[in-house]
Each structure stands twice: as structure tokens, then as C-alpha cells.
Image: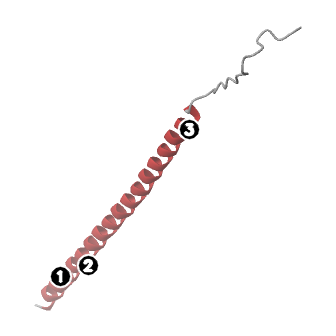
Amino acid sequence: MADERSGETPQTVIVQKGGGGAILIAVVLLLAVVIGGVYLLNKSQHDNAKTDAITSAAKSVGDAADKTGDAAKKAADSATRQ
């Protein structure tokens, strides 16, 4: 059997399968992880600031209650002395 294409230069055909779909999916997934991480960090910082504000407000209320108690005690002491 003789080669029927004698005289022709052999050609190589390269078939590339799969464009870049896997890379695109990886980039989208990485982006989602980064955004999620930033969201969680900001939420944590917001919760800490909120806790600090509540603690400060509770301390102020406690200080005001102490002052009110002291004033009531002074008023009661002065009323019993008269």
C-alpha cells in the first residue's frame, strides 16, 4: 500500500479543548471569598464598636445613679437633722 498523498508535506492539527472556563470559575470563587472575608471583618469591627458604645452608656447611667443616690442620702441626712 503506497501512500496516496506522496509529495504532500505532512500536517499536524492541534485541537485545543477547554477555553478558560476553569480559570474564570477560580477567579470568581476567589473574588467571592475575598468579599466574604472583608464583610465578616467589617461586621466584627462594627459589633465591637457597638459593644463599646453600650458599655460606655451603661457606665454613664451607673454614674448618674450614684450621683442621684448621693443626693438623696444628703437630702435625707439634712431632713433628719432638722
Whole-percent x and y of residue 6? 78, 14
Looking at this view, is 14 or 2 the one in front? Answer: 2
Question: Horizontal placement of 41 versus 82: left or right?
Answer: right
Q: Secondary structure at mark 3?
A: helix
In the rendered structure, find residue 66 and report the number of the disc placed on it: 2
Q: Give amino acid for label 3.
A: Ile
Q: Residues within 10 Å of mark 1 (few under 14, many from 20)?
A: few
Q: Give amino acid for label 1.
A: Ala
Taking the spot 14% from the left edge, 91% from the top edge, the residue there is 81
- Contact between marks 1 and 3 (CB within 8 A): the answer is no
Looking at this view, is 54 or 10 the one in front? Answer: 10
Residue on which disc 3 sits? 23
Real-space Cα separation, disc 1 to disc 2, in angstroms: 9 Å
Q: Secondary structure at mark 1?
A: helix
The image's colouring method is secondary structure
Question: Horizontal placement of 42 versus 60: left or right?
Answer: right
Nearer-N-terminus badge (1/2): 2
Residue on which disc 1 sits? 71
In the rendered structure, find residue 19 and report the number of the disc placed on it: none
Name the residue at the bottom extreme. 81
Name the residue at the left extreme. 82
